[in-house]
Image (cartoon, rainbow, N blue to C red):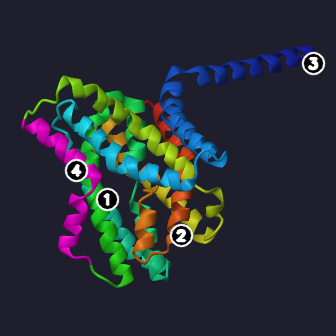
Amino acid sequence: MLTETTVSKLREKRLSVMANAIKDQLADSQFQNIACGAVFPMVFYMALGAGVRRAGVVDEAFLNRLTAMVFKVFFPILMLKNIYWAEAADRTNLRFVLYALTSVLLLIALCMLLVPRVIHEDARRGVVVQAIYRSNLTLFTIPLAQSVYGSGADLLISLLIALIIPLYNVSAIVILEYFRGGSASAKALARKIAANPLILGIVAGALLRVLRIPIPAIAEKPIRTLADLTTPLALFALGGTLHLTSVRKNRRILLPVFLLRMVLIPALSYGVTMLLPFTPMERFMLLMLFATPIATSSYPMAQSMGGDGSLAGELVALTNMGSVVTLFLFIFTLSRMGLL
């Protein structure tokens, strides 16, 4: 029989082994560099923005103007830089972009079929459909992909944004107009797409690259520096304009949409990509297509086109705050499984 002293020693040894295992896991460089390294900077920038606003250093009006400036000035520079200095595309890019377009269009079609059966107010139907399919690709995919894969991800990011952002804009206008009872002309849609700053940056970078027009060496450093400032500034402004109190309303809609949007759809999407011949980096990009929070631009668009602006703002706030947890768990789980 084991004596009480022996049992105590065995228990202490087992606890020591468990503690060391946990310590080794937390110290694992892959865990630190991928899971924490990808998500923590986003949390830090957003928290800093919220703290600065609460301290009264800046007000929300300033942060809204900063957001507009980042969108109209900094993001085009970032897109130009990503396209112009990206590595050459490989043969899998065509398959990658076709799958991305098809999956988004399929999700939109399913939403248009199913959401009206559950949501009965037209002003909310368009908002919920938009919330389910429209991700904040530019603000979240860029820093996350660069944290995980470095500059090697720049071309795939730019390709994804070049195709998906116009699709997001066109479909959002059509959907909101549909549920408002109006119609969107082809000329108006084309004008909005052509005027999108991200598209302008992508087109400029592509033209310079295709036509082999060199960017002067003296301009290269300022362009790269401004591009590097884009994500921190955008996340800083976003953190300062989010409101925790805004998620208390519409709970019956918020929680199901959040779980569907941030957990179920990304998990199912990644499972499908595992059955197809994609690289780990391509699978990660396609995961971010559905796992990143709702685009902040969906709020002003819904508000200006007859949608439920309050609900749209609450969904943006909830998914942006909740993504800190869900994105961390996705990245951590995939990294521990060796799938990144």
Q: Residues within 10 Å of mark 3 (few under 14, many from 20)?
A: few
The Cα–Cα distance between marks 2 and 4, rounded to whole angstroms, is 31 Å
- Left or right: 94 in relation to 339: left
Above or below 194: residue 176: below
Q: Which residue is mark 1?
A: 104
Displayed quadrant of residue 60: bottom right
N-terminal label among 4 and 1: 1
Instruction: Give the overall secondary structure of the magenta segment.
Output: helix
Q: Position of residue 114 (x, y in %)?
A: 41, 74
Q: Identify the mark at residue 24; answer none if there is no mark.
A: none
Q: Nearer the viewer, residue 157 or 102?
A: 157
- Which residue is found at the position 81% from the left and 18% from the top? 12
Q: Residues within 10 Å of mark 4 (few under 14, many from 20)?
A: many
**Which circle, 4 or 3, is nearer the viewer?**
4
Q: Which residue is mark 3?
A: 4
The Cα–Cα distance between marks 4 and 3, rounded to whole angstroms, is 75 Å
Above or below 273: residue 312: below
N-terminal label among 1 and 3: 3
**Which circle, 4 or 1, is nearer the viewer?**
4
**Which circle, 2 or 4, is nearer the viewer?**
4
Q: Identify the mark at residue 311; answer none if there is no mark.
A: 2
Amino acid beneath label 4? Leu
